[in-house]
């Protein structure tokens, strides 16, 4: 149990890393939209892909590992048990949904977008309709993920006040 505070601290840090993705999402999207049809748009799309991949991977894996560790170390916590800690069970359910969205939708879409960008690297400034379609889909998926992360964050910081 002496490692519990350190794991909790790491859990909070990983949540912060995931929230940075939420904070950076809209400014980078705006840059992508404002540079439509230019060479720099490809650069901003690549930056966007890199950031959501890096921050998402660090946040997701970190939260998952530290969250499981916290549940195993704390005798008051259990997995998916609504009667004891409804806030924690809700967070766990949302995390499962989030992992499904990541694995089944976001990662394949990001891969298609990256491949589309590479295929369009020979062309001038214009990107194909498929690239824009995947980019719009990626924006929506990242919004869904950010929303789930924000809800989980709110559950975490308010559970002591709600009962």
Image (cartoon, rainbow, N blue to C red):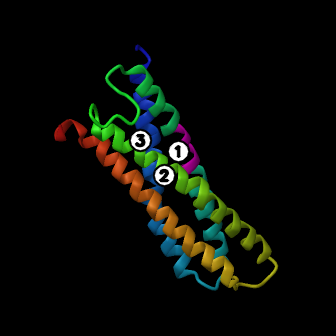
The x and y percentages for residue 45 are: 62, 69
Label 1 vs 2, first from the N-terminus: 1
Quadrant in which the N terminus appears:
top left
- Kindly identify which numbered label has been placed on residue 60: 1
Q: Badge 3: how crowded within 10 Å, few (<14), some, or many (20+)?
A: some
Query: Can residue 160 be seen at all in this image of the molecule?
Result: yes
Viewer-proximal residue among 80 and 130: 80
Q: Badge 2: how crowded within 10 Å, few (<14), some, or many (20+)?
A: some
| Cβ atoms at labels 2 and 3 below 8 Å apart | no
| Cβ atoms at labels 1 and 2 below 8 Å apart | yes
User: Magenta part of the protein: which range?
Assistant: 55-62
Distance (Cα) linking label 3 and label 1? 13 Å
- Kindly identify which numbered label has been placed on residue 98: 2
Residue 69 part of the magenta-drawn span: no
Residue at 55% across / 40% down in the picture?
61
Q: Is residue 156 left or right of residue 57?
A: left
The x and y percentages for residue 66 are: 48, 31
Residue at 55% across / 75% down in the picture?
136
Distance (Cα) linking label 1 and label 2? 9 Å
Distance (Cα) linking label 2 and label 3? 10 Å
Q: Is residue 128 left or right of residue 106?
A: right
- Kindly identify which numbered label has been placed on residue 92: 3
- Kindly identify which numbered label has been placed on residue 39: none
Residue 60 part of the magenta-drawn span: yes
Q: Is 75 located above or below residue 123 in the figure? A: above
Q: Is 126 located above or below residue 90 in the figure? A: below
Q: Nearer the viewer, mark 1 or mark 2?
A: 2
């Amino acid at each position: 149990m002496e490692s519990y505070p350190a794991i909790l601290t790491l859990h909070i840090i990983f949540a912060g890393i995931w929230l940075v993705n939420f904070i950076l999402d809209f400014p980078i999207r705006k840059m992508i939209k404002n540079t439509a049809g230019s060479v720099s748009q490809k650069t901003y799309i690549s930056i966007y892909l890199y950031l959501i991949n890096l921050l998402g991977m660090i946040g997701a894996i970190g939260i998952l590992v530290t969250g499981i560790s916290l549940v195993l170390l704390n005798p008051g916590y259990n997995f998916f048990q609504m009667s004891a800690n409804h806030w924690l069970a809700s967070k766990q359910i949302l995390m499962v949904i989030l992992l499904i969205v990541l694995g089944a939708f976001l990662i394949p879409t990001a891969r298609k977008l990256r491949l589309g960008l590479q295929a369009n690297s020979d062309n001038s400034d214009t990107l194909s309709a498929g690239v824009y379609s995947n980019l719009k889909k990626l924006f929506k998926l990242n919004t869904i993920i950010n929303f789930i992360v924000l809800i989980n964050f709110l559950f975490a910081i308010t559970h002591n006040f709600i009962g």
